[in-house]
Image (tube, rainbow, N blue to C red):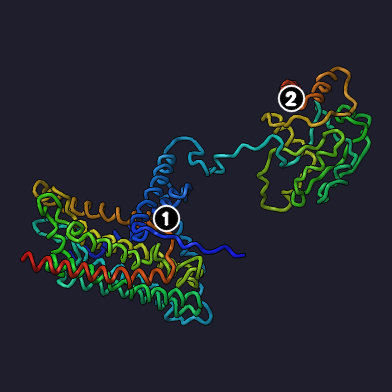
Amino acid sequence: MDDWLIALIKVVFIWVWVLLIAVIMTWVERRGASMIQDRLGPNRAGPFGLLQPLADGIKLFTKEDIVPDKAKKILFSLGPILFALPAFSAYAVVPFGDKIVLGGKEIILQVSDINVGFLYVVALGSMAVYGIIVGGWASNNKYSILGGLRSTAQLISYEVPLGLALLAITLIYGTFSLREIALAQQGTFLGVFPNWGIFKQPLGFILFIVTAYAEANRVPFDLPEAESEIVSGYHTEYGSMRLGLYLFGEYVNLCTLSALIVTFYFGAWHLPYINMAAFLGPISYGIASFLVFFLKVSFFLWLFVWVRWTVPRFRYDQVMGLGWKALIPLALINLFITALAIQLTI
Amino acid sequence: MAKPVVEKKYTLGERIYLLEILKGMVLTWKHFVFNFMASFRSGPHTVPTTWQYPEDRREISPIFRGEHMQTLDDQGREKCIGCGMCAKICPAQCISIVKAKVPEDQQELYAGKTYSSSFNIDLLRCIFCGFCEEVCPTNAIVLGQGYELAEYRREGCQRDKARLIENFRLARESGKLKPQRKPVIVAEPKAKPAPEGGAQKDPGVQKVEQAKPKKAAAAKETT
C-alpha cells in the first residue's frame, strides 16, 4: 500500500513539475526570442511578464471551440490528446534524481525503473507522430495533411539515427535501464574526463541532439508547421484549447527530450569530479540531485530556444537528405566503432 | 538577360554546417546578452528599438499636426473672426462654422469685429492636413500636439469651441505652443507691435525665443 502511494505521489509530482516547466517555457521562448531579436517581448502581465502563460491559457480556454464542418469529429478531438499523452508518458522512465530517504524509506526519484526503459522511450517517441498525422488528416485541410505527411516522413527518417545513436549508448553501459545508465556515469575515466556519455560518445551526442530537434519538430526541422509554406501545418484548423494542447505538448516534448539528453549524455544528476553523495545528508542529497538534473535540463531547454532563433528552416529535401545521407550512415559508423572499441578493450 | 547562377563553392567547414550554426549562435547570444542587460537598466526606453508606449513617449516635433485648438490672443480674446476660410478649404469638410457679429457688450471677449458663434470640428473626418491652420488669416486655428484621440463613442470625437479653447489653454500651460508661423494681421492694441515685426524677419531662433516671454505674459494674464 505504501509503495502504491509513493508511486502515485511521484507520478503527480513529476506531472505537475513538467507542466510547470512547459508553462514557463512558453514565457522563456517568447522573452528569449525578443531578446535575441532586439525586442522586449511580453512584459505586461505580472513582473517581467511572468504571468503571460496564464493570460494565454485563459485566452485559449475562453475562445470558441471550432470544429470544421467536414472534419472527422472523433479523430479531430483525438489528435491533440494523442500528441500530448506520449510526451507526458515518456517521463515515466526518466530518472529525475538519484534517491531520497524519507522516514527510513529509500525512494528512487524515478516513476518506474523498468528494465526496457530505453525501448519505452524510443517507442513513445514514435507515438507522438500519430497525434500530428491524425490531427492533420482529420482537419480536412490540405495544409494540415501536408504538415502531417511531412511530420511522418521526417519522423521515420530521424527515428532511425536516434535509435542507432542510443544503441551505441546501451552498448557502452550494457543496460536498457535509464537509471542504471545514469548511475554508471559517476566518476571519471582516463583520469580527466567525467564519466559522461558525451565524452564517450561525442559523435553519438551530436547525432542524438540533431535528431532530437527533428523529433520535437523544432526549428530548423519545423517542417510540419512551417508557417511560411503551409500556414500552420497540422494545427491550421485547430483553435482554443485543442491548439493549446498541441502547443503545450510540444513543450512537454522538449522537456522530455532535454531530460533524455541529460540522462544519456550529460551524467544525469552527477556533477563532474564531485561526488555529492559523499558529503550530503540523505534528504539534501535527494534534493540536490534533483536540482542538478533540472539545471542541466534547463540548459538544454534554453538551447532549444536559442537554436530556434538562430537557424533558419531547412528545405524539405535538405531535411530528408540530411537524415538519410548523413545521419544514418554516421550513426552506423558510430555504432560500428563503438562495438569495435568495446570488443577490443574487453 | 538573366543573371547567370554562380555556384558557390563551400568549404568543408561550411558543408558540415555545425560550425556555422555555432557562429550564428555566438551572434544571437551577443544580442541576447545586450538586450538582457538593457532590460535591467532603470528608466524608460532601455532597449534601443522599442518605446514602451504609455510610459515612454516619443518626442514629437513642435510642428506636429495633432488635435486642433482655438487660440486666444494676449488679452485672452478669441482670435477667430468667423470668416469660414478653414471650413471652405478643408478637404474632408470636417469644420462647420457659423459667423456672427460681436455683440456690443462682449467686445472684450473677441479680437475681431465678427466671431464664430459656433465652431465644430468632426475629428472622425479630419485628415490632419493642416490646411485650416495655413489658411487662417488670424492664426485662430492651430493644430496642436495631442494625438491620443481614441474615444468610446462617436460623439466624443466632436470638438466644439469650448473644447478647442480648453486645448489651447492646456497647451499654453504645458509650454507646448508652437511659434507662430506668420504675422498676425488682426487689429492689435498699439502697445506692443515691435516683437511681432522682429520675428517676421528671422524665422529661426528668434521666434522660439520670442515665444517664451509671450507665454510668460500670457500665463500672468490668466492667473
> Can you identify the residue that label 1 sits on?
A309
Q: Residues within 10 Å of mark 2 (few under 14, many from 20)?
A: some
Residue B8 sits in which quadrant?
bottom left
Q: Residue at x 26, y 75 (%)?
A: A123
The count of marks equals 2
Percent of width and height locating residue B163: 75, 40
Q: Chain for mark 2?
A: B
Which of the pair A216/B144 is nearer the observer? A216
Give the secondary structure at mark 2.
Answer: helix
Quadrant assignment for the N terminus of chain A: bottom left
Give the secondary structure at mark 1.
Answer: loop
Q: Residue at x 62, y 65 (%)?
A: B1
Question: Is residue A258 left or right of B106 when viewed as pictured?
Answer: left
Residue A197 sits in which quadrant?
bottom left
Q: Residue at x 22, y 69 (%)?
A: A333
Look at the image and tell me whether residue A6 can be seen.
yes
Q: Are marks 1 and 2 on the same chain?
A: no
Residue B210 sits in which quadrant?
top right
> Can you identify the residue that label 2 sits on?
B211
Percent of width and height locating residue B135: 85, 39
Look at the image and tell me whether residue A102 can be seen.
no
Amino acid marked by disc 1: Trp
Amino acid marked by disc 2: Ala
